[in-house]
Amino acid sequence: MSGIVSSSIITNSAAMVGVETLNSINSSLQTVQTAVSTGYSVNSAADNGAAYAVAQSVRTTMSGLTAANQQLGDVSGLVQTTSTALTNISNLMQSMDQTLVNLSSSTLSSSQRSQYASEFTSQLKNIASFVTGANYNGISLIGSASGTLSNTIAKFSGTSLSVATDANGSTLTITTQSVYSVYKSLSTIGASLTTNTTNAATVKAFLTATGQMTTSVSSMGGYMNTYGNLTNQINNQVTYNQNKMDALSNGLGALVDANMAAESAQLQSLQIQQQLATTALSIANQSPSLLTKLI
């Protein structure tokens, strides 16, 4: 019977085998072509459900870390702007301290005292300008809700701010410090310098360990330390997030990336197989027509 079937014009076994082989080759060829064109060996859950699920989870984490670094970069600008203002205020307070040291001398004339007092008042105005200008994107960390340091442009946040640091909902607290108390203390000193009753002994009291000038300098040092530490913390978190994303990216690549050298070789092999299978099917399809010549 096998000999009869092989010579049948109704049942062409060779053509059936050829079609099945060609379909299998075309399916494999489509898979390889997709991998070559996209660069991924796992493009969907249909390719490898478990690997694709893990890949999507990793991609979600990386997306969250990217967003966190964007937020950290934004708040870094705010903290650095604040630190710059505080540094300038601190530098100016050094000059103000020198002015008070000069005024603590009893050998100065009235004219000299008046000039030093005027210089102190001018420096105080600069401090007010530095504080009111220390805003980033309309937010201030050291402004004041009241007093002469109130800024109509910047919105002073009286409560701590928080910023996302990773993809797991962790946050970093950004504290706010109103420097109005320091400014008010310096303003009190400046006001006393403009009166005729202020003498060397009064100025010396401002410079003692518990004096207004000394405590103001100490407070300013505390503010700078706070935002300096925050700057380092933010930079460290950004670096960590980036390193983590690099590691996740490498793992993701090992999981779903296509081996382009191997895929290219496979592509060429399948293209040759496709040509051979097509030729074999063409020959098999000619068999029934050849049998008709026997009739």
Image (spheres, grey):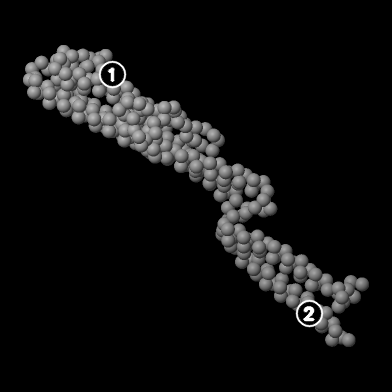
In this rendered view, identify the residue nearer to me: 222 or 293.
Answer: 222
First in sequence: mark 1 vs mark 2 = 1
Q: Secondary structure at mark 1?
A: helix
Q: Quadrant of residue 189?
A: top left
x and y percentages locating residue 167 in the rendered image: 54, 38
Amino acid type, mark 1? Thr
- Give the Cα distance between marks 1 and 2: 104 Å
Most distant residue in the right direction:
1
Q: Is residue 235 left or right of residue 127?
A: right
x and y percentages locating residue 8 in the rendered image: 87, 76
Instruction: Tell me, yes or no, if residue 159 can be seen here.
Output: yes
Can you identify the residue that label 2 sits on?
A: 286
Q: Is residue 117 left or right of residue 268?
A: left
In this rendered view, identify the residue nearer to me: 78 or 118.
Answer: 118
Q: Secondary structure at mark 2?
A: helix
Amino acid type, mark 2? Gln
Instruction: Tell me, yes or no, if residue 79 can be seen here.
Output: no
> Looking at the rendering, in which quadrant would you find the N terminus?
bottom right
Binning the other alpha carbons within 10 Å of mark 2 as few (below 14), some (14 to 19) or many (20 upward) gives few
Q: Quadrant of residue 159?
A: top left
Can you identify the residue that label 1 sits on?
A: 215
